[in-house]
Image (cartoon, rainbow, N blue to C red):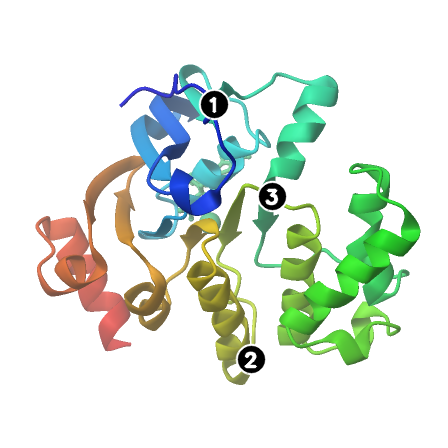
């Protein structure tokens, strides 16, 4: 599939659904001798929700990190909305703003309020006025269910609440795509669902999402496609029902056997 799509003539998001938004073509990456991404071809359409599964060390985090250029690649191309990833400078900052990322650890600024955490990027990078940024932030905090905590500091919130703030903070930048790298794996079990519910709502609202998660319920409920990685390669991709009921490789069967029975 080619990433060289021309810009659509209109901006209606539903009309654009189904067009490639994030395209990786023949991407390779090593860490020293370790070939951590092997000829990755992946095209994610606008509005599509992709769940990435695979054993620890298979390259899932590295894949996410190459998409907003936290990691460089050695060969292949990555395009977002038809544009190659910029190398550096202002264009790279703009790209980072277009690609929201939520990690396992929440990375909120400890000495800033929840509200300030969410408004910082829009004011600094998107050049929004403080009033506009705060109005938008409150809407987003409402949407993720923590608006009443806006004046508090991160440490005063539970892990689940902090992760929902981290999602709101990413959304405040109006990203084109959201990457989630095991966003619930550091949370206590009772907080996992409140974060997954926010993610499922985001998916239902049409956000393009690439989610590394082993939460099978979420994958079944929200994913359009499941991708299974092992040893730096994509071994399988299929609709969730098909993948979970009928994985075609031994590696995937073995992996599912382990995570479904523990
Ligand atoms: N910065 C790094 N330097 C060297 N090796 C790394 C680095 N980051 C990840 N790796 C290695 O690359 C492989 C893939 O890692 P990662 O992408 O984190 O996998 P996953 O997220 O699927 O667990 C692992 O073997 C890991 O140890
Ligand atoms: Mg990882």
Helix, strand or loop status at disc 2 = helix
- Which numbered circle lies on residue 44? none
Residue carrying label 3? 175
Q: Residue at x 41, y 48 (%)?
A: 47
Name which of mark 2 and mark 3 comes first in the sequence: 3
The residue carrying mark 3 has its beta carbon less than 8 Å from ligand 2: no
Residue carrying label 1? 7
CA distance separating discs 2 and 3? 25 Å
Q: Residue at x 56, y 67 (%)?
A: 186
CA distance separating discs 2 and 1? 40 Å
Judge left or right: residue 137 versus residue 175: right
Residue 169 is drawn in which quadrant?
bottom right
Helix, strand or loop status at disc 3 = loop
- Which numbered circle lies on residue 191? 2
Image coordinates for residue 34, horizontal then vertical, percent = 39, 28
Image coordinates for residue 180, horizontal then vertical, percent = 51, 53
């Amino acid at each position: 599939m080619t990433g060289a799509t021309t810009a659509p003539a209109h901006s209606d998001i539903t009309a654009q659904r189904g067009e490639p938004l994030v395209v990786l073509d023949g991407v390779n990456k090593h860490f020293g001798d370790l070939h951590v991404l092997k000829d990755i071809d992946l095209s994610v359409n606008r509005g599509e929700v992709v769940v990435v599964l695979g054993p620890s060390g298979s390259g899932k985090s590295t894949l996410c990190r190459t998409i907003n250029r936290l990691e460089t690649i050695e060969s292949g191309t990555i395009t977002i909305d038809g544009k190659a990833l910029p190398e550096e400078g202002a264009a790279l900052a703009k790209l980072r703003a277009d690609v929201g990322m939520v990690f396992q650890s929440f990375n909120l600024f400890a000495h800033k309020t929840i509200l300030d955490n969410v408004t910082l990027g829009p004011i600094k990078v998107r050049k929004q006025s403080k009033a506009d940024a705060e109005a938008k932030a409150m809407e987003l905090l409402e949407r993720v269910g923590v608006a009443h905590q806006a004046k508090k500091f991160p440490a005063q919130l539970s892990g689940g609440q902090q992760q929902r703030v981290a999602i709101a903070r990413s959304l405040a930048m109006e990203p084109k795509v959201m990457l989630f790298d095991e966003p619930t794996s550091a949370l206590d079990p009772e907080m996992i669902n409140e974060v997954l519910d926010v993610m499922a709502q985001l998916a239902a609202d049409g956000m393009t999402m690439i989610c590394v998660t082993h939460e099978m319920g979420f994958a079944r409920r929200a994913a359009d496609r499941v991708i299974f990685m092992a040893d730096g390669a994509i071994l399988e991709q299929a609709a969730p029902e098909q993948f979970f009921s009928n994985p075609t490789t031994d590696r995937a069967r073995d992996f599912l056997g382990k995570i479904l029975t523990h």
